[in-house]
């Protein structure tokens, strides 16, 4: 659970944005936009009003939330050509660069997508060329005992991932990568 | 330009895969698959045969190329429901984790998408639930003078990005983030 007394300075936010800015992208297309929502700011109020119930307890306590959007269409018509086939992939890369930069600054990050995308896009005056994607909550971990039971359970859940042999292939689809070869 | 005498050990490849493995994803959906193409392996030959002309000079020299795929559909029918709205974004995150892990290991990475996706998907027996996305070439930088003019020009190109004020918003769409605030 985030420490809701912690704030980030302008230069700290600049550093996080610089990490996203310098991510690679297809043809250097840089299809990312980040809405900075500092706790207490008008953007923060816009976001908080659109959060799903499950996220409304913890997201508002973060110091800053970055709401990401991708440049997906070259025009605002629904059938306008794609801006880049890799726009979402590249925004994911920019988000990862931001979260790993945060980590090097001793900050905690938690991404989420549980909010009313359509309503928030209107609130933020997002043009039809762009698609809202995720929120990246950034802050400092607070007192672990100062949380409700549900949040504590989530905070202490053991992280799990599929085995490397399930996600990697040494040959075609049916040939798993064997971990531990020399 | 990659040093085409350099190879990665199995444990080094394992480390890169572990970085991708532990990336975050929507609902821990982990929608990524990575095909490992070590220089000289059958997978490498499959990839090299499908490269675009612009990539056929430099990609084959990398020590390993990871070809990424995303779990995009729950079934193989063309109209099957999406597996996750964030599959491409999350595979982008996993790719970024892999490239930054490579960086900490002193390795150079270069992503590309210039290859015949449809043909390579067949060669790799990729099921219809998945979509091939990118190649991530990983290796060691070789002798900078041992390259043709076109490659040298690309290798020495100054990296450029849009200003932070263009990619970040302090409020709604028309309110740029002002870098340098305290």
Image (cartoon, coloured by chain):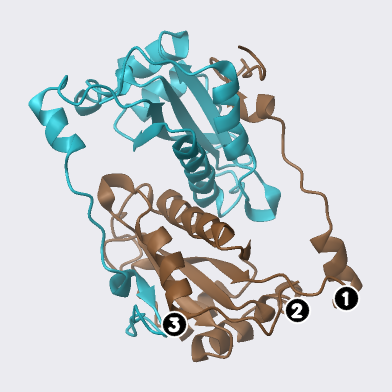
Chain colours: A brown, B cyan
Res. A47 in view: yes
Q: Are marks 2 and 1 in contact (CB under 8 Å)?
A: yes
Label whose residue precedes the other's in the sequence (2 or 1): 2
The answer to the question of whether label 1 and label 3 lie on touching residues, with beta carbons closer than 8 A, is no
Q: Could you say which disc has been placed on residue A57 in the image?
A: 2
Q: Position of residue B127 (x, y in %)?
A: 56, 27
Please tell me how crowded label 3 is: few (under 14), some (14-19), or many (20+) other residues with Cα within 10 Å.
some
* Residue that carries the numbered disc 1 in the rendered image: A148
Q: Chain of mark 2?
A: A
Q: Residue at x 60, y 25 (%)?
A: B14
Using the image, determine if residue B1 lies above or below residue A61.
above
Relative to A168, say whether B24 is above or below: below
Q: Is residue A78 left or right of residue B35?
A: left
Q: Nearer the viewer, mark 3 or mark 2?
A: 2
Q: Which mark is residue A124?
A: 3
State which mark lies toward you, 1 or 3. Answer: 1
Relative depth, front residue between A3 and A43: A3
The residue positioned 45% from the left and 8% from the top of the image is B42
Real-space CA distance between mark 2 and mark 1, rounded to the nearest whole angstrom: 10 Å
Circle 3 sits in a helix, a strand or a loop, which is it? loop
Which quadrant: the N terminus of chain A?
A: bottom right
Residue at the far left in the pictured view: B149
| Residue A71 seen anywhere in this rendered image of the structure | no
User: Where residue B146 sits in the image (x, y, percent)?
Assistant: 16, 19
Numbered label attached to residue A20: none
Q: CA distance from mark 1 to mark 3?
A: 31 Å
Same chain shared by disc 1 and disc 3:
yes
């Amino acid at each position: 659970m985030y420490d809701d007394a912690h704030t980030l300075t302008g230069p700290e936010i600049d550093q996080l944005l610089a990490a996203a800015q310098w991510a690679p992208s297809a043809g250097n297309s840089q299809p990312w936009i980040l809405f900075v929502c500092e706790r207490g700011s008008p953007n923060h109020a816009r976001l908080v009003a659109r959060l799903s119930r499950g996220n409304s307890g913890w997201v508002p306590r973060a110091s800053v939330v970055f709401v990401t959007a991708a440049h997906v269409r070259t025009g605002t018509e629904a059938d306008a050509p794609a801006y880049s086939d890799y726009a979402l992939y590249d925004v994911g890369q920019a988000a990862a660069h931001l979260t790993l930069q945060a980590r090097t600054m001793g900050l905690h990050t938690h991404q989420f997508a549980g909010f009313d995308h359509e309503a928030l896009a209107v609130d933020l005056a997002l043009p039809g060329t762009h698609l809202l994607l995720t929120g990246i909550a950034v802050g400092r971990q607070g007192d672990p005992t100062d949380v409700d039971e549900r949040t504590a359970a989530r905070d202490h859940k053991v992280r799990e991932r599929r085995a490397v042999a399930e996600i990697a292939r040494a040959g075609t689809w049916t040939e798993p990568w064997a971990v531990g070869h020399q």
